[in-house]
Image (cartoon, helix red, strand yellow):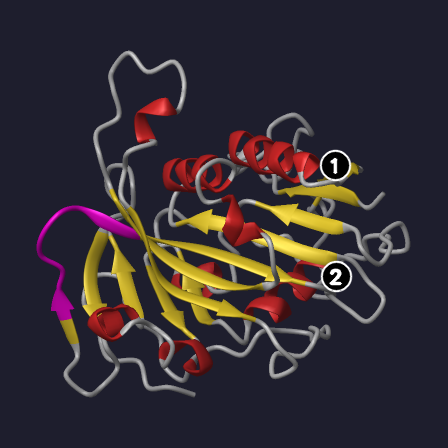
Amino acid sequence: MHRVHPVSYPLARHDRNRPPKLHQRRDLCALHELELALLELGFRHGEPIFNQSPAERTSDEAFEIDLSRFAAGDLLLQCMRPPMNDLDEGPKRKIEPANTNLERFFFRAFEPCIAWSARSHLRLAPAMQARIRLEYQDRREMSFQQKGWGAPYHELNALEGHGWRRHKGPRRTALFLLHVAALWPGGPGYLCAFGMDGCTTCVWSYRLARDLRHLLARPGFVMAELELGQIPEDVTDLRFCLDWKIEPLLVHEFTSEIPPSQPQSTPTPPRAKRTPRKPALVPQG
């Protein structure tokens, strides 16, 4: 029976001289929801993977995590936005990259789908831009509010030369799911589900484990849109979000046109950065 290994990052450290504490991890509720769904689909529990480098490490070279424990057919499960460009863009709410060899496999797996990933700004890769439903093509590039919860859209860009426009209407945000069959030849698969903040990541995982479980079945890339509702003041579980509208905007099943990912030293950034306050058209690389 194949194993599922939940992968987690440490919470942000206020004192970088102190090592991260093993019990203080990001998005554990979301990981728990999705892992239970995968166990019901036939996996068994593997090992928790702490994707982190030693606190005192200063080298730019990736810290080597032992990858020999993972077998073909295993699945690495992550419920967190990949911090591919957090340090490049510098949003207030950023995730500290782990700088591990495993993280570089994760980033490489996202490259055919997402070209830029920071907390306040995400741009789809060219191969996926063309696959968004016609009426939602202005979601090819998105900026997100950082104040409050839910990370609702701030501005949208169809990348057709007309620039950014302010999002109007109900508070909505984007959700993503990536599932690859093998991170490297003969290696484990990878499943990553995330929203643009911790709350929406939790809601997305909860719904994927219940009424949207069919999206977990095959390798591919999914982009969906969540209409943000109200979180009850006396909340004690997640049932309040069962009627929140989630609409798939892009569901692409992988074929041989998306090869298994290979490691590389650093992801390729766009040609120009976007400043958080004033979005500007980012040319496609």
Q: Which residues are magenta?
A: 165-173
Q: Nearer the viewer, residue 124 or 207?
A: 207
Q: Which residue is mark 2?
A: 101
Q: Is residue 123 above or below residue 189?
A: below
Q: Residue at x 31, y 72 (%)?
A: 140
- Residue 74, x across and y down, in percent: 79, 51
**Quadrant in the picture for residue 117:** bottom left
Taking the image as shown, residue 144 lies to the left or right of residue 8, namely left
Q: Which residue is mark 1?
A: 48
Q: In what element is the residue under mark 2?
A: helix
- Mark 2: which amino acid? Asn
Q: Which mark is residue 93?
A: none
- Mark 1: which amino acid? Pro
Q: Residue furthest right?
A: 68
Q: In what element is the residue under mark 1?
A: loop
Badge 1: few (under 14), some or many (20 or more) residues near its Cα, within 10 Å?
Answer: few
- Tell me the distance, in whole angstroms, between the alpha carbons under discs 2 and 1: 17 Å
Q: Residue at x 44, y 56 (%)?
A: 176
Taking the image as shown, residue 21 lies to the left or right of residue 236, namely right
Residue 221, magenta (yes or no)? no
Earlier along the polypeptide chain: callout 2 or callout 1?
1
The answer to whether residue 7 is seen in the rendering is yes
